Amino acid sequence: MSQTLVADAASTPGSIGLFDSGLGGLTVLRELKLSFPWESFTYLGDTARTPYGAKGAETVIRYSKECARFLSGCEIKLLVVACNTASSLALSHLAEECSFPVIGTVDPAVRTALGVSRNEKIGVIGTNATVKSGAYETALKRINPQVMVVSKPCPLFVPVVEEGMFDGTSAEKGIVKSLVEFYLSPLKESGVDTLVLGCTHYPLLLSAIAEYMGPEVNIVECSKAIAEDVRKLLPVSSSSGRNPQSRFFVTDEAARFSQLANIFLGSSQVQAVKVQMVD
Ligand code: DGL
């Protein structure tokens, strides 16, 4: 039996839709809100089913389609798949299904990485599913076949962020530092001059990652390049209106998500609404 997500709150027609498995996509939302302050946004965090990165391709594709259908029901005009796992595995499926443009994370991050790398040695970190998909390696080599790609899954970064350890006490910072060293030491030793944060949760750990990799390594994330892609797709006249608003939906407990989202966004604007799976 097919299942659909339904909102128990009104939609925001003409908004830009984003989804992620949880908090990570807020790193993209933050950039888009800065770039397009006149636009409205509808954000879905599929918190009941996070992490996507530990799931198989079929499951991620199914979840992604359900998220896209939910946002479609909110009458969005454009979908940003603010999740590298969903972008790596499901983007073509979503593009086929959706009646609005769909933008993913991989191509924007790849463009940025190739633009800044000098030695053509690029590191990519992401979830198990993203790294296993080979999406980054394929996209990087499609543009520059000479590039050497060193990929490394960092599966514990997502739960650490979902626990709110991105803004933590010194004890929490110690845990993050050890994890960063544990996962990134092979990348540091490999001589990459550019490291792609191939998961939208990872910019929340940016200071620990950048400090460990050192100033000579470019740290790349997708948000700014996504904003460039959104700009190309949005006609100037398409702004959502004079009273832009952001709506937040989650599939699990709303209070915790709202609290952490407000810390990250430095606001009190997030009052997420829990949406239900129904038959
Ligand atoms: N933030 C997501 C990504 O970019 C999802 C992480 C997860 O749920 O495992 O891959």
Image (tube, rainbow, N blue to C red):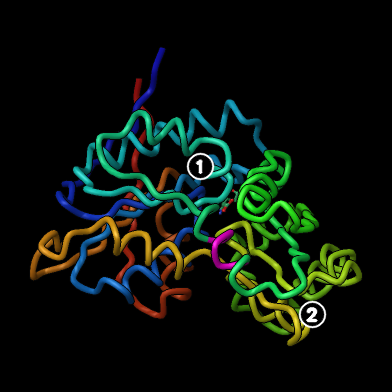
What stretch of residues is rendered in magenta?
109-113
Q: Which residue is mark 1?
A: 48
Q: Name the amino acid type tagged 1.
A: Ala
Report the residue at 62% width, 74% height from top: 116
Which of the 4 quarters of the picture holds residue 212? Answer: bottom right
Name the element at disc 2: helix
Residue 164 horizontal/vertical position (percent): 59, 68
Residue 128 horizontal/vertical position (percent): 72, 45
Q: Quadrant of the N terminus?
A: top left
Q: Quadrant of the C terminus?
A: top left
- Mark 2 and mark 1 lie on one chain; the one further toward the N terminus is 1
Name the element at disc 1: helix
How would you classify the magenta stretch by its main secondary structure?
A: helix
Residue 90 horizontal/vertical position (percent): 51, 35
Report the residue at 39% width, 38% height from top: 67
User: Do callouts 2 and 1 mark residues in contact (Cβ within 8 Å)?
Assistant: no
Q: Nearer the viewer, residue 270 or 205?
A: 205
Q: Is residue 135 above or below residue 62?
A: below
